[in-house]
Amino acid sequence: LVQLVESGGDSVQAGGSLRLSCEGPVYRYGRYCMGWFRQAPGKEREAVGTIADDGETRYADSVKDHFLISLDSAKNTIYLQMNNLKSEDGAMYYCAAAEWKWGVGCPLHAVAFPDWGQGTQVNVSA
């Protein structure tokens, strides 16, 4: 079990930016994938994007033009830079991690990730 801790959630106005962080001892996996997912009230959890330990990223179509995921492997930390936030980006954001075992890239499916953080809340006002 890898314990993950998210931080950086806040309330911002539409058009603003936020950077979320997620830290955890993912080195225990060896090779690993990490990802960001989000869930708004009354909606299912959805993928935001994932990053492999080699830096390869994948994004959901809804965010790929204004979100960026990065990795600081020395700190066992990933970041989610969110720019030009929209009201529909408001949600609880969760970090997840898994041992890398796929041929290329990391999947954009929550079921592939066994370890999760508690989440950090992002509110976007119009």
Image: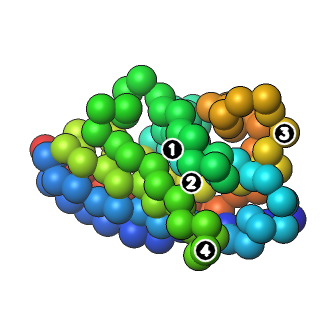
Looking at the rendered structure, the kind of residue marked 3 is Lys
Looking at the rendered structure, the kind of residue marked 1 is Arg
- Checking the image for residue 94, the label placed there is 2
Q: Is residue 63 left or right of residue 114?
A: left
Label 4 to label 1, Cα distance in Å?
A: 25 Å
- Seen from the viewer's position, the closer of residues 33 and 91 is 33
Q: Contact, CB < 8 Å: mark 3 with mark 2?
A: no
In the displayed orientation, state which residue is furthest to the front: 54
Residue behind mark 4: 74
Residue behind mark 1: 38
Q: Contact, CB < 8 Å: mark 4 with mark 3?
A: no
Q: How is the image coloured?
A: rainbow
Disc with the residue nearer the chain's start (3 vs 2): 2
Q: Contact, CB < 8 Å: mark 2 with mark 4?
A: no
Mark in front: 4 vs 1:
4
Judged from the image, the secondary structure of the residue bearing numbered disc 4 is: helix
